[in-house]
């Protein structure tokens, strides 16, 4: 699995044909093509970033992670 840093993850913002990845609790997930992540954005949260805090505050919490493909690990 690939290891991502803040800088390398930022390239995966879901814009201009780039894949959309988000980091959560040290793992990186692919949200490309997910209907909830149109153009790399989901309710004001942006792909290419660490979304650990945002998912912890969301109504669904981490229950949605099982539906996403893990593509690497994240080290801030």
Image: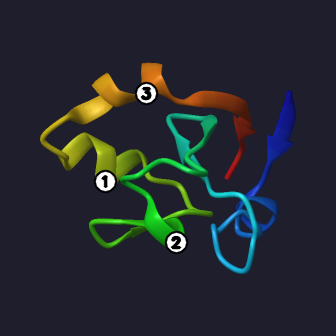
Mark 2, other Cα within 10 Å: few <14 / some 14–19 / many ≥20: many
Q: Is residue 45 left or right of residue 74?
A: left
Return the residue at label 3. Answer: 65
Q: Nearer the viewer, residue 75 or 21?
A: 21
As helix, strand or loop, the secondary structure at mark 3 comes to helix
Return the residue at label 2. Answer: 39
Q: In the figure, residue 72 lies in which quadrant?
A: top right
Q: CA distance from mark 1 to mark 2?
A: 18 Å
Residue at (19, 48) in percent of width and height: 57
Residue mark closest to the camera, 3 vs 2: 2
Quadrant where the N terminus sits is: top right
Q: In the figure, residue 20 lies in which quadrant?
A: bottom right
Image coordinates for residue 51, horizontal then vertical, percent: 44, 53
Q: Nearer the viewer, residue 59 or 14?
A: 14
Q: Nearer the viewer, residue 31 or 48?
A: 31
Residue at (50, 34) in percent of width and height: 25
Q: CA distance from mark 1 to mark 3?
A: 13 Å
Number of dots carrying numbers: 3
The residue positioned farthest toward the top in the image shown: 66
Residue at (67, 53) in percent of width and height: 76
Residue mark closest to the camera, 1 vs 3: 3
As helix, strand or loop, the secondary structure at mark 2 comes to helix
Image coordinates for residue 74, horizontal then vertical, percent: 69, 42
Which of the marked residues, 3 or 2, is nearer the chain's N terminus? Answer: 2
Residue mark closest to the camera, 1 vs 2: 2
What is the number of the mark on residue 54? 1
Which of the marked residues, 1 or 2, is nearer the chain's N terminus? Answer: 2
């Amino acid at each position: 699995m690939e290891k991502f840093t803040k800088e390398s993850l930022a390239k995966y913002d879901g814009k201009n044909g780039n894949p959309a990845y988000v980091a959560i609790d040290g793992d990186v997930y692919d949200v490309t093509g997910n209907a909830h992540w149109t153009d790399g954005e989901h309710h004001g949260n942006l792909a290419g970033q660490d979304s650990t805090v945002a998912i912890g505050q969301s109504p669904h919490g981490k229950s949605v992670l099982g539906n996403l493909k893990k593509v690497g690990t994240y080290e801030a």
